[in-house]
Image (tube, rainbow, N blue to C red):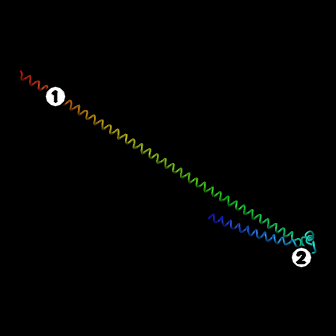
Amino acid sequence: MEEEARLRMAEDAKKILEEALQRAAQEAQQGGGGEGGGEAPGSRTPAPRGGATRARGADPSQGGGATERGGTKAQRGQQRLKEEQQRRKEEQQRQRKEEEEKKAQEERERLRVKAEAEKTRKLEAERKREETRKRRETEKKEKEERDREALRKRRDDERRQREEREREAKEKEERETEEREGGTGTGGASST
């Protein structure tokens, strides 16, 4: 929409400039017609030779004064043309400035969005790293606890097995001792 508005403004300025040029050209032609203004007012009879010069110098209200009036019109036309050109130049400068400001604003907005996205990305990455760190830490603690429990169980099993072997060895030794003592006592009684 803004692009269409700028195009319309440019077209309007172009038309205004063309109209101003046409008016200036017409006024210049009309003013130039006063160069041969030797005719007396209200008469088509040519003035005497050199009369135009005298009329211009003597009385601006006579035919020769048309050059002065025509010249003023031409000057006004040229002045309007200059003003129109200046106005168009200023309008173009204003449009360029607005366009540059718009582009600068768009660039600032793009950079802001990019920076915001980068900030969000970094925060998300940091959050994921923290979650991973905590999960690994938890897994490590759980593994250490499992390892400690396995070690404790293994030691308990080893202790029970050792106690069982010691108990069995003691019982065996006691039985063997009883058997030896019993055998000796029986033999002694028989001999007696």
Q: Position of residue 139 (x, y in %)?
A: 39, 43
| Separation of marks 1 and 2 at Cα, in angstroms | 171 Å
Q: Do the CB atoms of the residues marked 1 and 2 lie less than 8 Å apart?
A: no
Residue that extends furthest to the front in the rendered view of this protein: 49
Judge by depth and name the residue closer to the eye, 77 or 168: 77
Residue carrying label 2:
41
The residue located at (16%, 28%) in the rendering is 176
Residue that extends furthest to the top in the rendered view of this protein: 192
How would you rate the neighbour count of disc 1 (Cα within 10 Å): few for under 14, some for 14-19, many for 20 or more? few
Q: Is residue 150 above or below residue 22?
A: above
Upstream in sequence: badge 1 or badge 2? 2
Q: Is residue 127 above or below residue 171?
A: below
SS class of the residue under badge 1?
A: helix
SS class of the residue under badge 2?
A: loop
How would you rate the neighbour count of disc 2 (Cα within 10 Å): few for under 14, some for 14-19, many for 20 or more? few
Q: Position of residue 5 (x, y in %)?
A: 65, 65
Left or right: where 105 falls relative to 188: right
Q: Position of residue 144 (x, y in %)?
A: 37, 40
Q: Which mark is residue 176?
A: 1
The residue located at (63%, 64%) in the rendering is 3
Left or right: where 160 falls relative to 33: left
Number of marks drawn: 2
Left or right: where 131 falls relative to 93: left
The residue located at (72%, 63%) in the rendering is 88
| Residue type (three-letter) at the residue carrying disc 1 | Glu
Q: Position of residue 140 (x, y in %)?
A: 40, 42
